[in-house]
Image: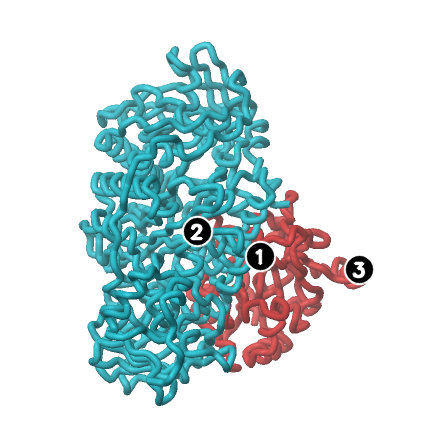
Chain colours: A cyan, B red
Amino acid sequence: MSEITLPGVEDAIALGLTADEYALVSDKLGRAPNQVELAMFSLMWSEHCAYKHSKKILRTLPTEGAAVVMGPGENAGAVSVDPDGDSDLICVFKVESHNHPSAVEPFQGAATGVGGILRDIFALGARPIAILDSLRFGEPTSERSRYLLDRAVAGIGHYGNSMGVPTIGGEVYFEGPYETNCLVNAMAMGLVTQETMIKSAAVGVGNPIILFGASTGRDGIGGASVLASAELGDDDADKRPTVQVGDPFEEAKLVECCLELLAEGLLVSLQDLGAAGLTSSASEMASKGEVGIDIDVAKVPLREGDMEPFEIMVSESQERMLCVCTPENVDAVVAITDKWEVHGTVIGTVTDTRAMRIFRGNDLVGEMPVEALVDDCPLYDLQPEKPSAPLYAAPEATLDGGASATDTLLALLASPNIASRLPLFEQYDCIVQSRTMRRPGECDAAVLALPDGSGLAASIDCNGRRVAADPYTGAIEAALECAANLACAGAKPLGTTNNLNFGNPEKPEIAWQLTEAVRGLGDACRALEAPIVGGNVSLYNQGADGPIYPTPVVGMVGALPDVDAAGVLGFGEEGDQVALVGWEAAPPLAASELAKLRGEALPDGLPEVDLDAVIAVQAAVREGVRDGSLASAHDIAEGGFAVAVAEACLAGDIGVTLKLDAPDDAFAALFGEGPGGFVVSGDAEAIEALAAKGVPVRILGEVGGDVLTIAAGDELVTVPLEQLAAGHAALAKLFP
Amino acid sequence: MRFGVVQFPGSCDERDALAACETVDGAEAVILWHRDADLKDVDAIVVPGGFSFGDYLRVGAIAQFSPVMAAVIAFANNGGPVVGICNGFQVLCETGLLPGALLPNERRRFICRQVDVEVCSTETPFTRACTAGDVLSIPSKHQTGRYYAPEALLEQMEADGQVVFRYANDSNPNGSLNDIAGVCNTARNVVGLMPHPEHAVDARTGSDDALALFASLAQGLTHV
């Protein structure tokens, strides 16, 4: 081993390990770690890589089901697109966060977030077919929030558009608790067949390991530990060098190269380089294959010649892949990487040592058991405790409590959480690859056509304010919201991915939010038969002004047998009947968007959800869409019934005249929020057929004209479409 | 009928273009790899959209030097029909096969939306199956699509009927001069346009208005 001054416990702490963890590393090695080893352990044992505060509760989530081809553990989860049929097509998908990088440098942070999740998809041999994103910022009245929004949207578009992968959906919320710590979560989907899907386990002692793609530089060093696993603070500008810089052109070549390598049958395994760079990708390959790996850092193509071995091992330079092939295929592999100008280089070998051995030329500069690196990080029990006082201040009131129902509807439509997302979505290519059957704004879920005439639908959602009011029920609502969106498209869930965005889990109140939300998510996904096949955890999302709202972002993929029957949200024909489906009584205003506009504090808890009843309603709506009887279907979400009706009018460019029978509380009936409600339209026969399925259906009036009119007891909402549209376009001014 | 679709590193819409070409009865479509000067005996060439060479230096600036482009230029100079879509239009302008240039959008943002495109000239191999004045619904998606030409050139082009497509019904998304969406060369065999006709060949995904454009290429061939 080469002579270098050994780092000590204070160096370990600076890299994010605790003193006890440092002692444990020394114990596992039988000696103190050197610089290379400490750098590698600090990353592999970081929250980001080791899930040390979340792994135990993640194990409670449902991960198995009829459609599941591959659950959590690989680069992404995989489901059969047709679990009951004979299609061999598999959809792989996953959501990941790039929150702290985006808070520090939003354009590159968001861009490389997209780049990273796309690599997870094609690392499995799948062609990436879609991106959805989930964004959270502070109120747009804040200059910083507007800057983060503008640059993050530009970054997502830059990467996804340049890659030729459509961005087909997503969501964005603006809430005070995200002011310091914005959230940028990106979900990607890919298509692959059983025969071409590949995994990351390194196998075959003596097989070479080839690194290809971009060269390795000093960017992103310590990103996983320093940036992703600690709270944000005043010195964040100093952390900009830990943010990676993306090059979608390099990745566009990498996708085609990987797919060609797999089509030629040249690879034994494939892995992308993400957080913690070579360190995590190589050690995970070794761990899964139950082998050892030798790497010679002197063979790694560098951007800067004087990089130290530890820097090479932890660099998070983007757009790099590792593969294993048999020795006789090296030349063929390198030739294809040359064709795509992502030049492959043999940098190591699979061994039987069960150790990661790092060489620089002939010098051994680090040696660690794979198991110690990958599996031996201590897991911590959370110490959850329900907070005794509210964690979040009441928002500033922006709407007078005495506003009329009409003014209230207009205020809601123009509120940043409800206003049309078109000004964002227009900045993304949603049509490349020619599969997009429903573009953003046409249906509650995005819909993609498959070659056999069936379709995939996808949705991503989470209302953090409601999770903050009640982490258990709020998480259930997030999963139900995704499933409701799929139902409106005519799709049934195949599987789920999630990104748990929370504050500092070492604090009991955050531990409680996390525990409760995971419990809710598990219960909902079990009931929906939508197992969780992959996901990500992002903790320590808090700054000096406190924690973010707990935000367990849920992404769901579903299937519909006939893609031509995919639903739309907009009203269609004059004279169609409009019905409210699913709700016997209006849900309350507490924790609603209207409550926020009125400046009301969050309630302590949300009404209990009857999962079976909501799922039955979703099934009925889904059937009505699939059999073509419903002309439109739209899930009731933020802003309640009246906003859902307004959205259906705007999407269909046609008015309605409705009457809600003498409700006890007209404002709750118009604007209350809760799961399980839908606004549908269709001919009388279609609505009758829906009621015959045994779910609550109330016919309220019909489609027609160019004015939205809803009579609710003593309240009358009446607004011309033109005025609705003007209010709904409120976000356009954020993107001059 | 055999179409060739050029592929550069960073091309995005080449598979969509292949599929669009194959909507023509009896047509086949093949990829023309950027490093390969062999045009594989194709009858017409599509230079597709995307971000060739990452749009580095300037959109289309690097792609023009690819070996395949030398062959495409020779093919065009010999009268062969060539269509450039979006990035392909930018590449053809860089090569000088088409007049003018594409500048960053007025709002300097990427914009993806369905636009109305009026066919202004049917005297090109890409529009001969249309009727002048037809308005086609075609998606447009780009950040650098603002058509520009010096005033004198622009006047000359207008006089000579070299404006093949114009944004209609106030749908100019990028600030192009004279609402120009697409142009042709003086010999009229090379056409470039910013909107994406290869994404308007299936009503289920938005529109099939551009089927006539691809059919035009085949119709033209019967005269060869």
Quick one: SS at disc 2? Answer: loop
Q: Name the residue under label 1.
A: B142
Q: For the residues marked 1 and 2, what is the alpha-carbon distance in whole angstroms?
A: 38 Å
Quick one: SS at disc 3? Answer: helix
Residue farthest bottom in this picture: A362
The residue at the point 47 percent across, 66 percent down is A220
| Looking at the image, residue B144 lies above or below residue B115 | below
| Closer to the eye: label 1 or 3 | 1
The chain ID associated with circle 2 is A
Q: Name the residue under label 3.
A: B151
- Indicate left or right for B88 with B178 as reference: left
The amino acid type found where label 2 is placed reads: Glu
> Residues at marks 1 and 3, common chain?
yes
- Please tell me which residue lies in front, B81 or A657: A657
The amino acid type found where label 1 is placed reads: His
The residue at the point 29 percent across, 71 percent down is A283
The residue at the point 26 percent across, 53 percent down is A380
| Closer to the eye: label 2 or 3 | 2
Q: Name the residue under label 2.
A: A231
Quarter of the figure that contains the N terminus of chain A: bottom left
The amino acid type found where label 3 is placed reads: Glu
Please report contact status of discs 2 and 3: CB closer than 8 Å, yes or no. Answer: no
The chain ID associated with circle 1 is B
Q: Dot 2: within a 10 Å radius of its alpha carbon, few (fewer than 14), some, or many (20 or more) residues? A: some
Quick one: SS at disc 1? Answer: strand
The residue at the point 46 percent across, 72 percent down is B31
Can I make out residue A682 in this image? Answer: no
Residue A250 place in picture, x, y as percent: 48, 70
